[in-house]
Image (tube, rainbow, N blue to C red):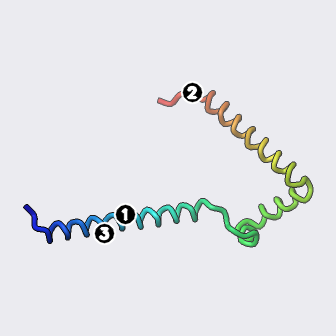
Amino acid sequence: MRSLEQLAQRKSLLVARADLQRLRLQLTASQVRHLVSPPASASARARLRPGVARWLGLAIAVLGVAKLGRAVRLAGLGLTAYRIVRNWQRPPEG
């Protein structure tokens, strides 16, 4: 049988490995969240894509938020329908 010291060392090693895995998972999740999430402020958005921000501001001013939201939703549905039809008509690969 193993001595109590060996068991205690093994237990502390397993705890340390579990903590390391947890920290690695948190770091990876944080990196993914940072890559996927949009910038927090409007100034950061304007710095990243000034043309998009300018056109979006113009569209909001002309159409209003509700109409622009409706138009974006309809465009998204249209693109989804287009992709479904396009993929449906494509012959199966293989």
Q: Which residue is mark 2?
A: 91
Q: Residue at x 20, y 69 (%)?
A: 8
Residues under labels 2 and 3: Cα distance?
53 Å
N-terminal-most mark, 1 or 3 = 3
N-terminal-most mark, 2 or 3 = 3
In the displayed structure, 35 sits above or below 64; it is below
In the picture, measured across the screen, residue 3 lies left or right of residue 19, that is left
Q: Label 1 is placed on what type of residue?
A: Gln
Q: Label 3 is placed on what type of residue?
A: Ala
In the picture, measured across the screen, residue 63 lies left or right of residue 18, that is right
Q: State the mark number for residue 21.
A: 1
Q: Residue at x 7, y 61 (%)?
A: 1
In the picture, measured across the screen, residue 67 lies left or right of residue 17, that is right
Q: Residue at x 75, y 72 (%)?
A: 43
Q: State the mark number for residue 16.
A: 3
Q: State the mark number for residue 9.
A: none
* Res 2 quadrant in image: bottom left
Q: Which numbered disc, 1 or 3, marks the residue closer to the eye? A: 3
* Res 70 quadrant in image: top right
Say if mark 2 contacts mark 1, CB within 8 Å.
Answer: no
The percent position of residue 74, horizontal first and vertical second, equals 79, 41
Q: Label 2 is placed on what type of residue?
A: Pro
In the displayed structure, 68 sits above or below 10; it is above
